[in-house]
Amino acid sequence: MKTKQQVVSEFRRTEIVDAARTVFARRGFAFGIMDEIAKEAGVAKGTLYLYFRSKTEIYKAVLDHDMKTLKKSTLHRIDAANGLKEKIRAFVMARLERAEANKDFFRIMDSESGSLAYTRSQYRDWLREPVHRLAEAIEKASQQGEIRRLDPERTAWLIADMTRGIIQRRLLTQSEAPPAADAAFLLDFIWASLTSLPDSPQS
């Protein structure tokens, strides 16, 4: 059981993270000041420093929170889907819809560099469990003859990377196409690759 103080502390921290996401999306990291975050959260500026030492720490907390939330929702949608094709659709849609819902913050997150940017290692850590779940489904479908034989883990990571590519393109071009349209296009491409026969060796 959590104490009342722990519950209040977690609630306040979540309020600050949500407020910071809004401010960073509206103003960018460089111009999103602590006073504005405090005002958005409805707390005194000094309260921010009870939970976070700096604006950079708040930014990283927003990033970590959002990636963990995305991981949880992606796993739930993969597990709820029936069959490999629907599991791939669930994986892609979970990521596209999350990026769409927070596209201003995602755009900032994707453009930051240096100490604010997440590394390839962090990206893989956030995605490791959903990708592993997808790899299990790929292996099962392969064993059942639904798709051709492929390395499950490499295939799952390739799907993750292609999904990230679509997200980046949507952020850069401000695509007006709904996420479902891009997901359907990517799924058709992936499924054709998974079910096509490998090229015959040339004599």
Image (cartoon, rainbow, N blue to C red):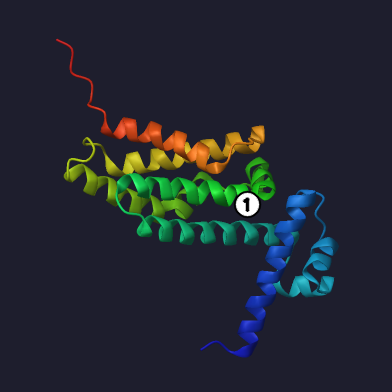
In depth, the one of 113 and 72 nearer the eye is 72
Q: Quadrant of residue 45?
A: bottom right
Task: Give amino acid for label 1.
Answer: Ala
> Residue 84, image x and y in percent?
31, 47
- Which residue reaches farthest left? 203
In the image, is residue 131 above or below residue 177? below
In the image, is residue 116 above or below residue 5? above
Residue drawn 21% across the image and 36% down it: 149
Q: Quadrant of the C terminus?
A: top left
Residue drawn 53% across the image and 46% down it: 96
Instruction: Kindly identify which residue carries mark 1.
Output: 101
Say left or right for 153 vs 17.
left
Instruction: Identify the element where label 1 is drawn.
Output: helix
> Residue 127, image x and y in percent?
45, 52
What is the crowding at mark 1: few (fewer than 14 residues within 10 Å), some, or many (at least 20)? few
Q: Quadrant of residue 57?
A: bottom right
In depth, the one of 127 and 146 nearer the eye is 146
Residue drawn 23% across the image and 20% down it: 199
Say left or right for 32 vs 192.
right
In depth, the one of 6 and 93 nearer the eye is 93
> Residue 115, image x and y in percent?
65, 48
Residue drawn 31% across the image and 54% down it: 82
> Residue 113, image x and y in percent?
66, 42
How many circles with numbers are drawn on the protein?
1
